Amino acid sequence: MDLTAAELRVLDAVERTGSFSAAATTLDLTQSAVSHSVRMTERKLGTVLFDRGRHGARPTPAGERAILHGRGVLRLMDVLRADTRAAAGGWLDTRLRIAAFRSAAAQLLPPALTRLTARHPQLSYDVSIVRDVGGGTASEVVEGRADLAIVNLPHRLPASAGLVGGELLDEPYVLIHPARSADPRSLPLIDWTENCSTETQAWFRTQDWLPPATINVADDTVLLSMVALGLGMAVVPETTAADRAPEVTVEPLGPTAPRRTIGYLTTPALSRSTALRELVAELRGPRAPRAG
């Protein structure tokens, strides 16, 4: 009565698509085959996994747990195949799923993936950009949608989430302002939602020259564009400032500037995979020179 990989894939597809018919299309099966597979899985587990209705299929609480664990099992089966082939002298040919906030994806990932792909050309990648609010990128790993999350440390999830990880980069915050500004510290302040760590906010409160933010935005690319157009100044991590336009000047904030630590998180099981360990090593390695 053990579950099969095919049954776990059906559960995953039904949850992702929201209906048995859409899952059937995704898996190239008939709807009756998907329905039969779900019924057999429910019989094996002894509980109902989906609420069926006119609006599709929604997982029950038991279904949510089954899908979460099923995704982990399927991913470990993929890792098993890839690591076994690589250990026998073959290609390392798995697909890494990475969740990152925007500036990390733009600045840390490209050089790391370039070096990793040069050694293992059969690797492929799915990179999702997730805002660093709430559970952020770490939630993608917990929910089985990503193998590795690039996060701002400390992350917000409790220890019960069961993730492991480490540091990748420690960087200071810097002041950015329009290059043509004669007195940049007199400009209005622009801030964005993700720029809200406890340390950063505590530092902000000690700086008499920093006024309350005149503009708050939900994305740091918008912030960079606004600074380039002369709408104000901003205090941002050095990595974020690397994406600035030529019209934006960067100034250090001195030894008392707040700092940001970027790290990674994954599951204990996936942390042992060859591809993920090599990715982490490259993320910690030399990066391409920053613009300017």
Image (cartoon, rainbow, N blue to C red):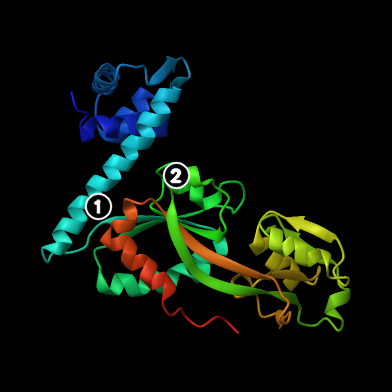
Q: Nearer the viewer, residue 266 or 112?
A: 266
| Quadrant containing the N terminus in the rendered view | top left
From the viewer's perspective, tell me whether residue 289 is left or right of residue 256: left
Q: Residue at x 70, y 54 (%)?
A: 193
210 versus 196 height, above or below: below
Classify mark 1: residues with Cα within 10 Å, few (<14), some (14-19) or many (20+).
Answer: many
Earlier in the chain: of badge 1 and badge 2, it is 1
Residue that numbered label 1 is attached to: 79
* Residue 224 falls in image quadrant: bottom right
Q: Nearer the viewer, residue 258 or 68?
A: 258
For marks 1 and 2, give the CA distance.
17 Å
What amino acid is labelled 1 in the image? Answer: Val
Q: Nearer the viewer, residue 174 or 222?
A: 174
- Residue farthest to the front, as pictured: 159
From the viewer's perspective, tell me whether residue 3 is left or right of residue 254: left
Q: Residue at x 76, y 67 (%)?
A: 203
Q: Position of residue 116 (x, y in %)?
A: 32, 71
Q: Which label sits on residue 142?
A: 2
Q: Position of residue 200 (x, y in %)?
A: 71, 64
Q: Is residue 13 visible?
A: no
Q: Residue at x 56, y 72 (%)?
A: 170
Q: Residue at x 58, y 53 (%)?
A: 131
